[in-house]
Image (cartoon, grey):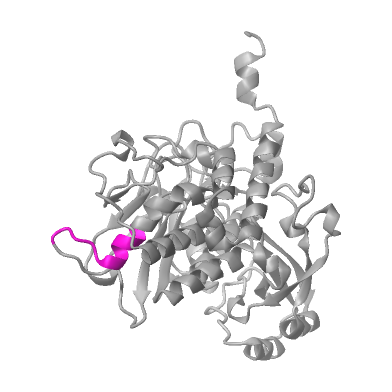
């Protein structure tokens, strides 16, 4: 169906983006002169979900200097707000203390459909920083910088749009949901034109919020869209990615629709990816992956691929964090099944994209759209650090289909979330990169996620066994 008419109460998008602000003083000056009425302060949890609250302007100004308190339960419950059983980093035994969150002035953005407000991100300090996803990414980025490099990255997301509301989808038991378009029609100019208002709202909102997109198009499948975020430095690329996912879902629901970033929602269609395009810049500002002749890889690119193929099977849970993630990682559905690399080969976990100059890069094809952007990028950067430190050789590239290749020992990806959590928990490399506290608590959270799903009887089991067995 065509797009719903725009809500006449929606304000026009601002003439240009707000910020970024260099420091707290600059942001405070904007707050005092812009006539703001409130701010929305947020942090990001294990699952890449934004958790936050509205505050008044006076509270915002105070928080810019002193920080603000946020309950540690954020790291003690799951995506369904259920507290993990037993002792944990943040559980009943700890009393769910308040932790200090420092506001990030550079993150401040206006939301086009919330006039008089401001969106500001915070990051945990002190004890919770040991398990905070954003802090974990910053630690491996710092390790990479000590090796002489920084990361440039851009996230690509596939998501499905449905003509459904949250209440309606629940009433249907998540069955029989109606996508906004039928059938397969990848790169369809027709679909994009019929739904021009939807595409325009995504593009204009992302521009206004400093989340620039390089591309937006239909993918193959009913109601599926792919968006490519513009490349940016290090943690900023993940900051943009996590906001993009939330804003797309918010825009959809404001129009009586729903967007999903599940790794695989349908038995019939391929899963939804959260690919990351990544390159390195050296201390002199030069593209470290550029160059190479006669099939030879530049040293930094070779070592980066060597680290990725060697370490990813143990770090896979960072890019595939749910039980549903592993339903996407199957042969023939545009997702990898083992840690191999190839030259412009989309059947591999790591696609080396040859190009002149700075455009030569690695595409990380393991992450699904469900991955926490901070952790998906942290796992890749950590693996690259190991490759650079150890001078690891990636071996020969995969020729032809990676699904038909002989898998070297130790390179198969985990088949389930339980396997992935166990490999992460027992990985010396994971502990070296992220610390014992992070590894133990994150692995525990993933085991709890798997257990929560295992306790529920899926409809497929009832259909298969209820009568016949």
Q: Horizontal and vertical percent for residue 361? A: 32, 63
Left or right placement of residue 308 versus residue 431 in this view: left
Q: Is residue 183 one of those drawn in magenta?
A: no
Q: Residue at left 38%, top 48%?
A: 349
Q: In the image, which residues are magenta?
A: 294-305
Q: Residue at left 64%, top 39%?
A: 450
Left or right placement of residue 132 versus residue 286 in this view: right
Q: Horizontal and vertical percent for residue 27? A: 64, 86
Taking the view exactly as shown, the residue that stands out farthest to the left is 294
Image vertical order of residue 72 relative to residue 158, above or below = below
Quarter of the picture containing the C terminus is: top right
Q: Residue at left 34%, top 56%?
A: 306
Question: Total of numbered circles in the picture?
Answer: 0
Q: Horizontal and vertical percent for residue 70? A: 77, 67
Question: Quadrant location of residue 448?
Answer: top right
Image vertical order of residue 1 relative to residue 404, above or below = below
Q: Is residue 296 one of those drawn in magenta?
A: yes
Q: In this rendered view, identify the residue nearer to me: 384 or 389.
A: 389
């Amino acid at each position: 169906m065509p797009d719903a008419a725009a809500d006449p109460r929606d304000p026009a998008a601002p003439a240009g983006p707000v910020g970024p602000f260099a420091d707290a003083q600059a942001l405070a000056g904007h707050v005092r002169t812009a006539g703001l009425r409130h701010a929305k302060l947020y942090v990001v949890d294990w699952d890449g979900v934004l958790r936050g609250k509205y505050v008044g302007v006076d509270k915002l100004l105070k928080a810019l200097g002193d920080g603000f308190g946020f309950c540690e339960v954020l790291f003690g419950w799951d995506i369904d707000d259920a507290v993990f059983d037993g002792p944990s980093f943040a559980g009943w035994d700890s009393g769910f203390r308040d932790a200090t969150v420092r506001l990030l002035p550079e993150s401040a953005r206006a939301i086009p459909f919330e006039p008089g407000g401001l969106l500001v991100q915070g990051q945990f300090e002190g004890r919770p920083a040991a398990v905070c996803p954003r802090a974990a990414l910053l630690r491996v980025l710092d390790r990479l910088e000590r090796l002489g490099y920084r990361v440039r990255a851009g996230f690509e997301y596939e998501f499905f749009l449905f003509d459904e509301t949250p209440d309606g989808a629940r009433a249907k038991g998540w069955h029989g949901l109606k996508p906004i378009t039928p059938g397969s029609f990848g790169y369809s100019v027709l679909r994009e034109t019929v739904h021009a208002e939807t595409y325009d709202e995504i593009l204009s909102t992302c521009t206004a919020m400093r989340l620039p997109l390089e591309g937006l198009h239909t993918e193959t499948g009913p109601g599926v869209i792919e968006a490519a975020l513009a490349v940016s430095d290090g943690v900023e690329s993940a900051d943009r990615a996590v906001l993009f996912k939330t804003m797309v879902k918010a825009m959809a629901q404001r129009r009586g629709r729903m967007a999903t970033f599940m790794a695989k929602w349908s038995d019939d269609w391929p899963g939804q990816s959260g690919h990351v395009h990544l390159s390195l810049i050296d201390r002199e500002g030069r593209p470290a992956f550029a160059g190479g002749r006669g099939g030879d890889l530049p040293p930094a690119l070779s070592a980066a691929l060597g680290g990725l193929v060697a370490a990813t099977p143990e770090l896979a849970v960072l890019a595939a964090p749910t039980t549903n993630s592993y339903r996407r990682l199957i042969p023939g559905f545009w997702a990898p099944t083992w840690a191999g690399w190839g030259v412009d080969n989309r059947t591999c976990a790591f696609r080396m994209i040859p190009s002149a100059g700075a455009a030569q890069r690695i595409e990380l094809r393991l992450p699904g759209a469900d991955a926490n952007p901070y952790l998906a990028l942290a796992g890749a950067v950590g693996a690259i650090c190991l490759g650079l430190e150890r001078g690891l050789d990636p071996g020969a590239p995969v020729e032809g289909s990676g699904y038909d290749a002989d898998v070297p020992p130790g390179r198969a990806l985990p088949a389930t979330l339980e396997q992935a959590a166990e490999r992460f928990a027992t990985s010396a490399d994971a502990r070296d990169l992220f610390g014992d506290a992070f590894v133990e608590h994150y692995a525990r959270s993933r085991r709890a996620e798997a257990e929560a799903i295992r306790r529920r009887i899926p409809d497929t089991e009832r259909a298969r066994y209820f009568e016949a067995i």
